[in-house]
Image: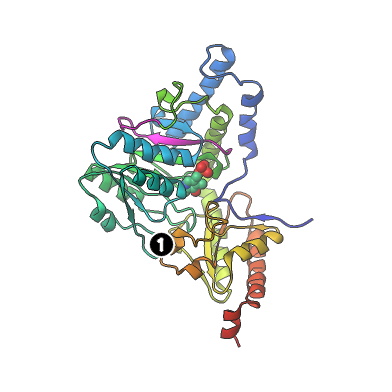
């Protein structure tokens, strides 16, 4: 049997068996519409309430501040458009960063077409946002700041608590796309002064198609999805009951195992990084230590990232050229460009993300395969040949 190694946990995760088990009754037995009043519906309504409480507790929010959505993209769209629409009279300026996920960047582009002005903060060579730059970008008409908690491509963790503090002091709302952070990094929306936070279940071993937007009590925000009165009238649509139950269970498991699992992943990550950096003309992208426990992003000079990923695929190793969303696009990654990589280096980069099923054996195997594959691919590269004549 061909060996398979999945190293794309930042793109999505499998559903943990305990999560699936928890979800199952809500497909077949307790399928009642939570808006109805008979027994099986009361059951589902209670399950949603429990899930809401469980999730709220983990991020130190109130259950009434948790709104279920269809995932990270919807939560990001809602946060930005909802705040823009509800606060547009106060000001039409929004601050975000150059390295956000496309769910944020393309929503910003949309808002620009509708009269909003967006400032995109630059980042340093590690992908870190600077507080000074943020301070400089603030205007009288700034209504919202949106900075991701941790970057999906290079794994850099942003100074969220400091940003939250600054936003609070300057009277701006603060949203964070925490899709990559939730489950990995402890989050406290009070301590960190976060007003809105996006999460997505399928990035932490829950099902796809379900997420949360945390909205601090008292925040003025318009609805994105209009219709019935679900989610306190703010987000219409019959609830994804099984998805919500599964997401809550997955988050509970993640929170319980976090410290041990992070230690394990950091060990594996650093082992893989050391192994890869032994390959000539290879470089790590992002910060050496201030990065997500499972993230490795590397550049191999004189190797096309896309061809490398396809070659790995043919050998049963699943990696990515950057974010899943930019895969297939010809443009170099906007994140790698923002940290100062020239286009050619950005196109010579791949992302390997580790997770629950990754073993030390996997890491060593991938290290060996990479060394061979990179070396083989370079044999056909004119520039490499020229340098090594
Ligand atoms: C995956 C991801 C999203 C999108 O979440 P979906 O649930 O897939 O819509 C948004 N932001 C970041 C940082 C992500 O990694």
Q: For residue 121, what is the image quadrant?
A: bottom left
The answer to if 7 sits in the magenta stretch is no
Q: Main secondary structure of the magenta part?
A: loop
- How packed mark 1 is, by other alpha carbons closer than 10 Å (few <14, some 14-19, many 20 or more), is some
Furthest toward the top, the residue is 38
Mark 1 highlights which residue? 338
Name the quarter where the N terminus is drawn.
bottom right
| Res 84 seen here | yes
Among the 4 quarters of the image, the one containing residue 143:
top left
Please state the horizontal and vertical placement of residue 386, each as a whole percent of the image. 58, 85
Front-most of 170 and 191? 170
| Quarter location, residue 168 | top left
**Residue 271, position in %: x, y?**
57, 64
> Is 208 or 13 nearer to us in this picture?
208
Secondary structure beneath label 1:
helix
Residue stretch rendered in magenta on the structure: 207-223
Location of residue 6 in the rendering, given as x and y in whole percent from the top left corner: 64, 54
């Amino acid at each position: 049997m061909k060996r398979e190694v999945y190293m794309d946990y930042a793109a999505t995760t499998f559903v943990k068996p305990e999560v699936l088990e928890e979800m199952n009754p809500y497909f077949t037995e307790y399928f009642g519409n939570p808006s109805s009043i008979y027994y099986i519906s009361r059951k589902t309504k209670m399950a949603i309430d429990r899930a809401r409480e469980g999730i709220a507790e983990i991020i130190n929010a109130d259950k009434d501040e948790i709104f279920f959505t269809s995932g990270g993209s919807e939560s990001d769209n809602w946060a930005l458009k909802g705040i823009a629409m509800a606060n547009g009279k106060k000001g039409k300026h929004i601050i975000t960063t150059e390295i956000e996920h496309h769910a944020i960047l393309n929503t910003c582009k949309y808002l620009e077409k509708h009269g909003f002005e967006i400032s995109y903060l630059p980042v340093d060579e590690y992908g870190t946002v600077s507080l000074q730059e943020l301070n400089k970008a603030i205007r009288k008409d700034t209504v919202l700041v949106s900075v991701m908690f941790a970057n999906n491509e290079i794994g850099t963790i942003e100074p969220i608590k400091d940003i939250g503090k600054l936003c609070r002091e300057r009277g701006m709302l603060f949203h964070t796309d925490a899709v990559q952070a939730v489950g990995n990094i402890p989050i406290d929306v009070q301590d960190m002064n976060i007003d809105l936070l996006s999460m997505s279940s399928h990035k932490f071993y829950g099902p796809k198609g379900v997420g949360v937007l945390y909205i601090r009590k008292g925040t003025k925000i318009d609805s994105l999805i209009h219709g019935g009165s679900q989610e306190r009238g703010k987000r219409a649509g019959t609830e994804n009951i099984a998805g919500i139950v599964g997401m809550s269970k997955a988050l509970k498991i993640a929170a319980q195992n976090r410290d041990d699992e992070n230690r394990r992943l950091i060990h594996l990550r650093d082992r893989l990084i050391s192994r890869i950096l032994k390959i000539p003309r290879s470089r790590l992208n992002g910060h050496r230590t201030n990065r997500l426990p499972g993230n490795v992003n590397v550049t191999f000079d004189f190797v096309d990232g896309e061809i490398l990923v396809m070659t790995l695929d043919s050998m049963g190793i699943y990696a990515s050229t950057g974010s899943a969303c930019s895969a297939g696009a010809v443009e170099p990654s906007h994140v790698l460009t923002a940290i100062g990589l020239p286009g050619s280096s950005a196109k010579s980069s791949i992302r390997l993300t580790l997770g629950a099923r990754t073993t030390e054996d996997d890491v060593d195997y991938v290290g060996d395969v990479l060394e061979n594959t990179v070396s083989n691919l370079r044999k056909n590269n004119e520039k490499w040949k020229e340098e090594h004549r």
